[in-house]
Amino acid sequence: MSTHAPRTYERVSLNRTMIALSACGIAMLVLYRMGVRAKSTPDIVWFLKVVAVQTPIYLAAVWLSLRSLDSRAVLFAGLIFAVLFRLSIIFSTPYLSDDIYRYIWDGRVQAARINPYRYVPADEALAGLRDEKIYPHINRRDYAHTIYPPVAEAVYFLTTRISESVTWMKLTMVGFEAIAVWAIVQLLASFGFARQRVLLYAWHPLAVWEFAGSGHLDAIAVAFVALALLARRKNLESGSGVLLACATLVKLFPVVLFPAFFKRWRWKMPLAFVATVIAAYLPYLSVGPARVLGFLPGYASERGMVSGDQYFLLSVGRQLFPVPTVAYLIFALIVLGAVSIWLLQSPHTSGLEYVRNGLIIASVFLLLLAPHFSWYFTLLIPFLCFIPSIAVFYLTFASFLLYLTWLSDAPPQMLLLKAAIFVPFLLLGGIEIWRRE
């Protein structure tokens, strides 16, 4: 029997995959360049139309990545396109968010040897640091202290010592993405998955727009979470604790992943986590323990976390009964606690369970929190490389709808908007669970 036929078939299949992937990549690249024409609030609908066209192209690339055998050529070609996607928008002025200007400002303040948690940007003590490129674009500059945790502040400081520019800060975030991609590739190989599955992250439009486009610090958290997943795979308990703490010290809410990393009756990971958090906050405690939280309490009030307006499930409940916010918060803690206990007691047979557990608890948390901003959902994308959940794919893409709040964020519109995001997610998630049982 000839051995040439299977090899010929594999070469033909690889060639077809490469051609199809290249076609998808070129189409996506054109759409990224089209998307940067959006400049003002009315353009948000144009931007969302671009994303809507990108979605099926991305899903086609996902199908190609999942169906093909492990291939260095597919991986290399896919990553080249991922780099091109980011380069196509990284030099553009941020359109979807102005948070990046606060990052640069905080780095500048620290370079002046001033604790970034001490003053609001408009304080006269910082008047000498103001300029025309960064300061006028800082949101909440008149009343909000910085909200960002210490590891984020350290990254801002180091980045701005090279350049206090928007482009350089974006490059830093894309650099952290590169770290995340490396860690995901290593983890995929350790599980025996095709390495090109990393394209499920690297090609995802939400990651590209939020990190290369807006320069959001969530890229740093994603990188530390990916490294923590790799450390957990290598049974480096202290390392996974330190890395998960670093992710938490960038964005705070990666702390919900703790149950996915914790091994019962093993204490190295939690001790390393706590020690890292304490050590990171120590340099900033000159303002006092309460003030290192910065604008976090004010942000919680401003975003409707105190009133309860932010929470989708609570808003639905209030259509029937006058549910107090405290009752909902207790309910949310009970749900997270119950999910955590269930995950800790679930059997471990394939080694992939802790990754699955991380995806589950992160998804539950985002459902309970129902944030107003799409970049919060980027945390889910790395998990899709290992567990390509249709429900989570939907959730990450549907989160783009939150940009419609630019047109109206009145409570009735917000309820309908979040219903369009979370109701299909719950239905799809329920179907996935039913089919696996």
Image (cartoon, rainbow, N blue to C red):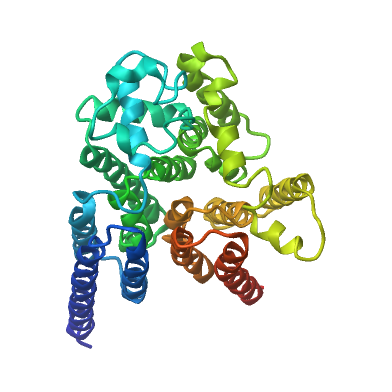
For residue 418, above or below residue 336: below
- Residue 63, compared with residue 129, is above or below; it is below
- Vertical placement of residue 113 versus 37, above or below: above
Q: Nearer the viewer, residue 378 or 73?
A: 378
Quadrant into which the C terminus falls:
bottom right
Where is residue 308 drawn, in percent x and y? 68, 49
213 with respect to 314 (left or right): left
Residue 354 coordinates in the image, percent (x, y): 56, 50
Residue 238 image position (x, y, % from top left): 51, 30
Describe residue 96's horizontal placement relative to residue 346 as left or right: left
Left or right: 201 as drawn, with respect to 298: left
Q: Can you see residue 64?
A: no
Percent x, y for residue 410? 58, 60
Q: Quadrant of residue 298?
A: top right
**At x 71% / y 64%, what residue is drawn?**
316
Viewer-closest of 342 and 335: 335
In the displayed structure image, the side of residue 68 where residue 143 appears, left or right: right
Is residue 433 or residue 169 the one in the foreground?
Answer: 169
Q: Residue furthest right?
A: 321
Query: Which quarter shows the N terminus?
Result: bottom left
Residue 209 can be seen in this image: yes
**Quarter-wise, where is residue 415 in the image?**
bottom right
- Residue 105 sits in which quadrant? top left
The residue lying toward the viewer, choosing from 349 and 411, is 411
Q: Residue at coordinates 54% horizontally, 55% vertically from top-left?
A: 359
Give the tally of numbered discs.
Answer: 0
